[in-house]
């Protein structure tokens, strides 16, 4: 018998090549008449010209646009506060997040802070956001985080720690998926953002507290899309079909893990980003193998189901072996030492992971400090 569950996602999703260039028209229903728009992105996206068409279209449609392009990876609270201050000074009536996970996460948090009804410190955790927000529209330029359809934002707090906000007001009014925006993504970020999306689906499917029939179906559909396209997209960055499947897969995985949240892999990845500024997707890719092996004793039937769904060798060995093969084939880093992390760093990282009470309870197998240390040491 199926246990009771709820499933929530963004109210409108548009998938259309070229949609970003016609942003004023495609986003009009979600903008709800707003005329002054805060456009949140980062310097890399802005410098690459990915936002040029969207910005030109918004301005041609008579909208006033203020661009905040100072988002950095694993955005610290200082970036959030600066963006909010600029948005208030500008009189922003809507927020558009354009880029990878960090710009989209920043846009979400800025939107719920704009009203001044609640401070940032009180928003961390699960369903702690009570503030209202203006219209929010998200456009991804990578196929990884799925942030465009999740209610999650992850920020760096203090010097190194990463904390999450998971609350329904962070769901956008509209997600616009334009695969043309991902055509120029280099091989390396294509690889690790794609593996990140696969991790989202795997962790959603094996969540011991919140997995449900809808998230399960989305996770399996996501894995099928991503598994079938990641190597093609890495080998030929202009393969439009592969890019489209990657973007769809990341979005489907985002819907899955927003309702059946991530677990041990993400908990172990956070210190790599917070302490050593390793890109989030790459962090997940590096720590994935030992966590899969650790979880296999408890998650064997579920890992076996994924293996069968993807046509791999039977059992958890099929999934673990395939994720190893993909990482090897796309040429990403595989060890902590390749990322400049040594055995001396492991205790502090493990302490950070062990304290993550948002993600660890979702893991199919209980992860204590000693097990976390052993997994890090496995990939030194």
Image (cartoon, rainbow, N blue to C red):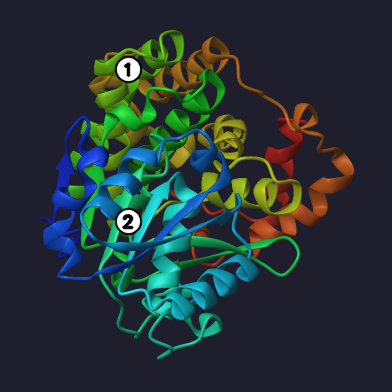
Image side of residue 216 versus residue 114, left or right: left
* Depicted 115 relative to depicted 112: above or below: below
Secondary structure of residue under mark 2: loop
Q: Residue at x 42, y 54 (%)?
A: 104
Residue situated furthest right in the rendering: 344
Q: Position of residue 36 (x, y in %)?
A: 31, 69
Q: Closest to the observer: 57 or 84?
A: 57
N-term mark: 1 or 2: 2
Q: Closest to the observer: 350 or 71?
A: 71
Q: Position of residue 99 (x, y in %)?
A: 43, 45
Q: Is residue 163 in sight in this rendering?
A: yes
* Mark 1 nearby-residue class (10 Å; few <14, some 14–19, many ≥20): many
* Mark 2 nearby-residue class (10 Å; few <14, some 14–19, many ≥20): many
Q: Residue at x 63, y 63 (%)?
A: 76
Q: Closest to the observer: 149 or 212?
A: 149
Q: Quadrant of the C terminus?
A: top right
Q: Is residue 3 in sight in this rendering?
A: no
Q: Which residue is mark 1?
A: 229
Image side of residue 264 versus residue 198, left or right: right
Q: Quadrant of the N terminus?
A: bottom left
Q: Closest to the observer: 72 or 321?
A: 72
* Depicted 378 relative to depicted 122: above or below: above
Secondary structure of residue under mark 1: helix
Q: Which residue is mark 2?
A: 150
Q: Position of residue 340 (x, y in %)?
A: 82, 34
């Amino acid at each position: 018998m199926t246990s009771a569950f709820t499933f929530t996602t963004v109210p409108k999703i548009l998938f259309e090549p070229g949609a970003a260039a016609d942003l004023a028209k495609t986003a009009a229903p979600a903008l709800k008449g707003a005329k002054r728009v805060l456009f949140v992105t980062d310097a890399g996206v802005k410098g690459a010209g990915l936002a040029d068409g969207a910005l030109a279209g918004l301005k041609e449609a008579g909208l006033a646009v203020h661009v905040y392009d100072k988002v950095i990876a694993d955005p610290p609270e200082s970036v959030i506060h600066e963006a909010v201050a600029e948005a208030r000074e500008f009189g922003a009536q809507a927020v558009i997040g354009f880029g990878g996970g960090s710009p989209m996460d920043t846009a979400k948090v800025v939107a719920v802070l704009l009203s001044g009804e609640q401070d940032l410190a009180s928003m961390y955790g699960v369903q702690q956001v009570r503030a209202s927000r203006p219209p929010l529209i998200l456009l991804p330029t990578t196929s990884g985080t799925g942030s465009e359809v999740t209610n999650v934002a992850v920020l760096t707090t203090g010097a190194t720690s990463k904390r999450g906000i998971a609350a329904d007001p962070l769901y956008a009014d509209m997600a616009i998926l334009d695969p043309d925006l991902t055509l120029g993504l280099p091989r390396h970020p294509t690889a690790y953002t794609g593996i990140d999306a696969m991790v989202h689906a795997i962790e959603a499917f094996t969540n011991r507290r919140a997995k449900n029939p809808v998230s399960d179906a989305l996770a399996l559909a996501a894995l099928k899309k991503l598994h079938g396209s990641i190597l093609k997209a890495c080998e030929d960055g202009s393969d439009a079909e592969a890019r489209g499947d990657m973007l769809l897969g990341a979005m489907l995985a985002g819907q899955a893990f927003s309702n059946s949240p991530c677990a041990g892999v993400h908990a172990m990845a956070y210190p790599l980003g917070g302490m050593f500024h390793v890109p989030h997707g790459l962090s997940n890719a590096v720590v994935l193998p030992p966590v899969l092996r650790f979880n296999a004793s408890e998650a064997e039937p579920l890992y076996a189901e994924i293996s069968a769904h993807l046509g791999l060798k039977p059992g958890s060995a099929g999934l673990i072996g395939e994720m190893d093969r993909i990482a090897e084939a796309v040429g990403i880093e595989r060890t902590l030492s390749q990322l400049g992390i040594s055995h001396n760093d492991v205790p502090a990282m493990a302490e950070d992971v062990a304290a993550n009470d948002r993600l660890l309870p979702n893991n199919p197998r209980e992860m204590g400090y000693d097990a976390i240390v052993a997994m890090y040491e496995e990939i030194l």
